[in-house]
């Protein structure tokens, strides 16, 4: 009976119960199950939403290359699939950050986090199952970065080239000349409901002799062969005009041939109008399309090539004609420094001509050095730049995993602090942190590619910036520090602004008092000047400070 009841249950419910039983046999607690359920749901939903939004931006970027070429839905879906795979480095860290903030924020908003702490469960124990999930995300991010994303770049670049090489579908408008078919210019006067063309004019330019071949027809139809390799034109009641358009010294006349017809068909061969997909990727040699082992091999070979180029150009610069005494410092040759001139003869010439020749020689040597230096830099750049890119991409195979781990340990403490769930406050906080991460990461990569900083620092600069913040937030949150109490934090901000406004108000009162005393002083001077214009007695300054008012409160009150 129990077996029949179990068989009647839905498949999803049975799978869910089997999974619960398996996890219980592994020793997974009810708390762990609840935390996993609270985290995995928002994580999957946010990852799907972020990937969809980024994919729409990706589609909008390449929409001009997809529309109007007769691509099948399968090809467009394949293009979007590989394109979405290249967006994993952006979607996965953001989904981890937002899901961790939402999970802990929901627990704090519903007072569940407070209840767990009241029951004696520490925050470390609460975050333990989520830490295991974060570890799986980190491992999955590494395999995605090393195995999936390089294949996606190879496929998307190849597919984009195939789509770019495909010409747009032939759509002949009415009333204007259409030159979308190579070697022909076609004009249609009108089109009826049955897709029958009227007043057709066709110029044949395949002979490259100008407008010497013209066909005019009363009506006709256009069609494309199923394999899109031929364009068939069926014409009715028309005339074909052909001119020789050639002249000689003996005969300068032009020959015109006119042919009337009631029915005529013109077959035009087409190229690249049918989409042809390349089976294997063409961009496997690109840096973005290589995994860790391939990048390691390329790094070794490029390092050898770069060292060889650097040594070659260094020897070439040192043994140039304008550096003629390099052997003076070669201890293997002369066992010491050998002088090629006397010190007292330096800057002394026998004649003015010798001085001019010496200065011209120095000028020529310096000019040669000035001209050759950019050449050496350009030659070394040809091997140094690919080497830097290879090293950076080799390091970046690990940056995605580190970003997911750091964002988890940033999001979980912040969620416990703000105690807000949903997509409101967590989304704003996540976007701010992600924009900071993205700007720092892109800037570091560009600086490292240009050689301004080392490849290691350029690849891990975002980790260096965010890792201390993640460690500090996690430590403060696990210690239940008062500094991390959101109510206390708001109270501190409120007290700060209250003190600031109080000081501003006292300063304004003091300035007003000084202004009033100054006006009274000016009025007193004007009164004395009017009563005795020959003798003006200056009234002492009555500027009152706060310290003077505090020392003599009675006098200040009397003056007021």
Image (cartoon, helix red, strand yellow):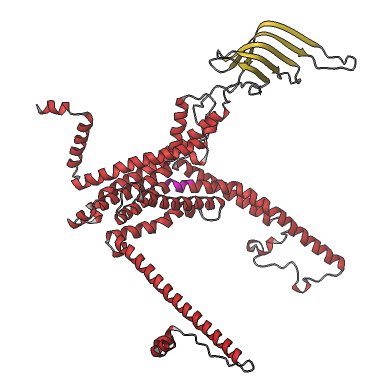
What is the residue that sits farthest to the right in this orientation?
A: 250
Magenta residues (range): 393-397
Compared across the picture, whether 318 is left or right of 453 comes to right
Q: Position of residue 414 (x, y in %)?
A: 33, 55
Residue 29 showing in the rendered view: no
Q: Position of residue 89 (x, y in %)?
A: 43, 44
Q: Against 1, is 419 above or below?
A: below
Dominant SS type (magenta):
helix
Q: Position of residue 556 (x, y in %)?
A: 42, 87
What is the residue that sits farthest to the top in this orientation?
A: 262
Q: Against 38, is 511 above or below?
A: below
Residue at the image position 40 percent from the left and 41 percent from the top: 50
Location of the C terminus (image quadrant): bottom left
Compared across the picture, whether 381 is left or right of 557 comes to right
Q: Position of residue 92 (x, y in %)?
A: 39, 44
Residue 482 showing in the rendered view: yes
Q: Against 165, is 494 above or below?
A: below
Pick whichever, 155 or 529, lies toward us.
529
Residue at the image position 47 percent from the left and 80 percent from the top: 513
Residue at the image position 75 percent from the left and 19 percent from the top: 211
Compared across the picture, whether 322 is left or right of 58 comes to right
What is the residue that sits farthest to the front in this orientation?
A: 531
What is the residue that sits farthest to the left in this orientation?
A: 1
Count of numbered badges drawn on the protein: 0
Residue 373 is inside the magenta segment? no
Compared across the picture, whether 357 is left or right of 333 comes to right
Location of the N terminus (image quadrant): top left
């Amino acid at each position: 009976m129990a077996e029949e009841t179990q068989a009647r249950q839905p498949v999803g419910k049975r799978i869910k119960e089997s999974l619960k039983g398996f996890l219980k046999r592994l020793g997974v607690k009810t708390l762990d199950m609840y935390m996993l359920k609270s985290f995995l749901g928002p994580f999957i939903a946010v990852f799907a939403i972020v990937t969809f939004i980024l994919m729409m931006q990706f589609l909008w970027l390449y929409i001009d290359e997809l529309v109007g070429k007769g691509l099948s839905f399968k090809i467009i879906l394949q293009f979007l699939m590989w394109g979405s795979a290249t967006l994993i480095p952006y979607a996965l860290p953001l989904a981890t950050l937002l899901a961790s903030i939402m999970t802990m924020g929901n627990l704090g908003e519903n007072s569940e986090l407070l209840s767990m702490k009241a029951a004696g469960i520490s925050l470390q124990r609460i975050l333990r199952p989520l830490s295991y999930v974060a570890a799986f995300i980190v491992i999955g991010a590494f395999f995605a970065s090393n195995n999936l994303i390089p294949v996606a770049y190879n496929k998307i670049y190849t597919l984009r080239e195939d789509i770019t090489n495909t010409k747009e579908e032939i759509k002949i408008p009415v009333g204007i000349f259409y030159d979308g078919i190579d070697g022909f210019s076609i004009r249609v006067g009108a089109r009826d409901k049955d897709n029958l063309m009227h007043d057709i004019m066709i110029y044949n330019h395949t002979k490259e002799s100008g407008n010497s071949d013209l066909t005019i027809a009363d009506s006709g139809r256009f069609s494309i062969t199923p394999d899109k390799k031929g364009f068939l034109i069926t014409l009715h009641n028309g005339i074909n005009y052909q001119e020789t358009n050639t002249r000689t010294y003996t005969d300068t006349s032009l020959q015109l041939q006119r042919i009337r017809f009631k029915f005529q068909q013109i077959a035009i061969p087409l190229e690249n109008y049918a989409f042809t997909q390349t089976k294997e990727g063409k961009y496997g040699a690109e840096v973005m399309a290589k995994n860790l082992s391939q990048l390691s091999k390329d790094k070794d070979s490029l390092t050898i090539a770069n060292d060889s180029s650097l040594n070659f150009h260094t020897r070439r610069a040192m043994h140039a004609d304008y550096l003629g005494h390099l052997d003076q410092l070669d201890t293997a040759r002369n066992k010491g420094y050998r002088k090629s001139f006397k010190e007292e003869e330096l800057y002394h010439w026998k004649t003015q001509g010798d001085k001019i020749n010496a200065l011209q020689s120095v000028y020529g040597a310096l000019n040669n050095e000035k001209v050759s230096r950019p050449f050496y830099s350009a030659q070394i750049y040809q091997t140094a730049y690919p080497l830097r890119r290879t090293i950076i991409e080799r390091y970046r195979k690990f940056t995605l995993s580190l970003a997911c781990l750091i964002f988890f340990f940033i999001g979980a403490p912040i969620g416990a602090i703000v105690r807000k769930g949903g997509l409101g406050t967590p989304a704003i906080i996540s976007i701010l942190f992600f924009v900071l991460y993205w700007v720092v990461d892109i800037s570091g990569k560009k600086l490292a590619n240009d050689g301004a900083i080392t490849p290691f620092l350029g690849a891990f600069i975002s980790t260096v910036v965010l890792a201390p913040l993640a460690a500090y937030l996690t430590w403060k949150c696990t210690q239940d520090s008062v500094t991390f109490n959101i109510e206390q934090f708001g109270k501190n901000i409120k007290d700060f602004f209250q003190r600031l406004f109080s000081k501003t108000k006292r300063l304004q009162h003091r300035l007003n008092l000084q202004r009033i005393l100054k006006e009274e002083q000016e009025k007193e001077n004007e009164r004395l000047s009017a009563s005795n214009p020959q003798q003006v007695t200056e009234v002492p300054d009555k500027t009152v400070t706060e310290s003077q008012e505090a020392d003599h409160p009675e006098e200040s009150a009397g003056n007021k």
